[in-house]
Amino acid sequence: MSFLKTLLPASANNDFRGGRVPLAGFGLLIALTAFRSLVHLLKDDSGVNSIASIHLFPGDPDPNQVIYMYSSLWGGQQLILVVLYLIVLARYRNLIPLMFGLMALEVLLRLTTGILHPLTEEFYVRTPPGKLGNLPLLGASLLLLYLSHRGVAKSAGSSPQTAKT
């Protein structure tokens, strides 16, 4: 089975043949994304100071409120992705490889944003966990995508339809 057909199957259904490891990994990545999204959305400072350790900026009116608002909006966007991931997990599991692809794309865009609009060390008390986690998250998403495709391809190779041709 081609990689493109694994990412974009002809129909969406709950028949995931990518294996147990990608399925469990998807659940863990959903939990991580849910935690991050709720922190950004609900925490007073949206995690910007207390977790990411970005320094407070002086000013009147308080410029930090604008930063918190945008970070909170990001948390809302992440929560929408969590809902999508949960729908896929519950009803359309053969789209899990596509979700891994979207996760990898999201991390690549975060890394690109860091290059285009870098925050240098003077903005932080310490390196934020999100910055440290980008490459491992990208690697995990790509590895799980690969394992999903391998499982789907292996399953397609041993299906009764393939044996007849």
Image (cartoon, rainbow, N blue to C red):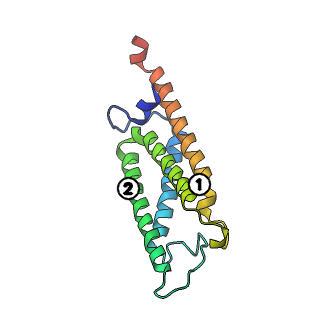
Q: Is residue 26 above or below residue 11?
A: below
Q: Is residue 22 above or below residue 2?
A: below
Residue 119 appears in which quarter of the rendering? bottom right
Q: Residue flagged by tag 2: what amino acid is it? A: Val
Q: Is residue 160 above or below residue 47?
A: above
Q: Residues within 10 Å of mark 1 (few under 14, many from 20)?
A: some
Q: Residue flagged by tag 1: what amino acid is it? A: Asn
Side (left or right) of 119 relative to 39: right
Residue assigned mark 1: 134
Of all residues, the one furthest to the top in this rendering is 165
Residue assigned mark 2: 83
Q: Position of residue 74 (x, y in %)?
A: 44, 64
Q: Residue at x 50, y 33 (%)?
A: 149
The quadrant of the picture occupied by the C terminus is top left
In-front residue for pair 160/51: 51
Q: Nearer the viewer, mark 2 or mark 1?
A: 1
